[in-house]
Image (cartoon, rainbow, N blue to C red):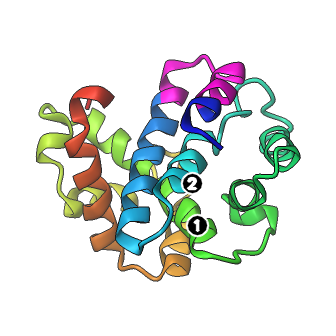
């Protein structure tokens, strides 16, 4: 799948600026992890970009609409990763792409929330501050901490290093992302 086609699919169903930014942040983090793991950067970026593409238009059917569309296009690997990006859906994790999307989705959103409450934004955010906020159940209360921890465990990375990696990617793109 081309990047431009993925963007068209994204824009079919998603208009919310905050949701588009979330998917862009996950896209950037996934692309960076693909490079680190020696994987296909385009495939990983598109997976991050499209993981919530149907959420705004079809919240009760998420992620089945985007998964079905991707499968009909022959994009089974991306479709499977998207179908598995929440542990409670019970989809098995069969490869690094599946595990990376789970590990990056909730935590990237959480890190963005942490950056938004800081006067300097992402510029001065450190992993220890994110870990402290993770322990505060009142902060970004809708973020499921168990999903973050399960994702880190399945990806086989250490939490602090994973947080630092995501922060670094977001810092490199802070102007575009408004962080």
Q: Tag on residue 67? A: none
- Would residue 136 be visible to someone looking at this image? no
Q: Position of residue 12 (x, y in %)?
A: 71, 20
Q: Tag on residue 43? A: 2
The reply to whether discs 1 and 2 touch (Cβ–Cβ < 8 Å) is: yes
Image quarter of residue 68: top right
Residue drawn at (67%, 34%), measured in percent from left and top?
Answer: 53
Binning the other alpha carbons within 10 Å of mark 2 as few (below 14), some (14 to 19) or many (20 upward) gives: many
Q: Considering the image in quadrants, where does the N terminus appear?
A: top right
Looking at the image, is mark 1 or mark 2 nearer the viewer? 2
With 170 as the anchor, is 65 left or right in this view? right
Q: Position of residue 20 (x, y in %)?
A: 52, 28
The span picked out in magenta is 7-20
Q: Considering the numbered disc 2 on the image, is that residue within a helix, a strand or a loop?
A: helix
List the residue tagged with mark 1.
97
With 165 as the anchor, is 26 left or right in this view? right
Closer-to-camera residue (128/37)? 37
With 144 as the anchor, is 93 left or right in this view? right
Closer-to-camera residue (116/84)? 84
With 129 as the anchor, is 26 left or right in this view? right
Give the tally of numbered discs.
2
Residue drawn at (57%, 54%), measured in percent from left and top?
Answer: 43
Q: Considering the numbered disc 1 on the image, is that residue within a helix, a strand or a loop?
A: helix
């Amino acid at each position: 799948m081309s990047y431009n086609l993925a963007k068209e699919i994204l824009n079919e169903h998603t208009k919310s600026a905050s949701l588009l930014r979330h998917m862009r942040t996950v896209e950037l983090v996934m692309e960076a992890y693909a490079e680190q793991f020696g994987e296909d950067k385009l495939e990983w970026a598109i997976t991050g970009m499209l993981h919530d593409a149907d959420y705004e238009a079809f919240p009760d059917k998420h992620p089945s609409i985007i998964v079905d569309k991707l499968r009909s296009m022959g994009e089974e690997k991306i479709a499977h990763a998207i179908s598995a990006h929440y542990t409670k859906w019970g989809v098995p994790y069969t490869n690094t792409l599946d595990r990376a999307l789970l590990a990056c989705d909730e935590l990237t959103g959480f890190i963005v929330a942490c950056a938004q409450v800081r006067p300097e934004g992402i510029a001065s955010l450190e992993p220890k501050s994110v870990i402290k906020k993770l322990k505060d159940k009142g902060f970004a209360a809708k973020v499921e901490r168990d999903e973050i921890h399960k994702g880190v465990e399945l990806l086989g990375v250490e939490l602090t290093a994973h947080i630092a990696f995501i922060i670094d990617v977001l810092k490199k793109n802070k102007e575009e992302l408004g962080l």
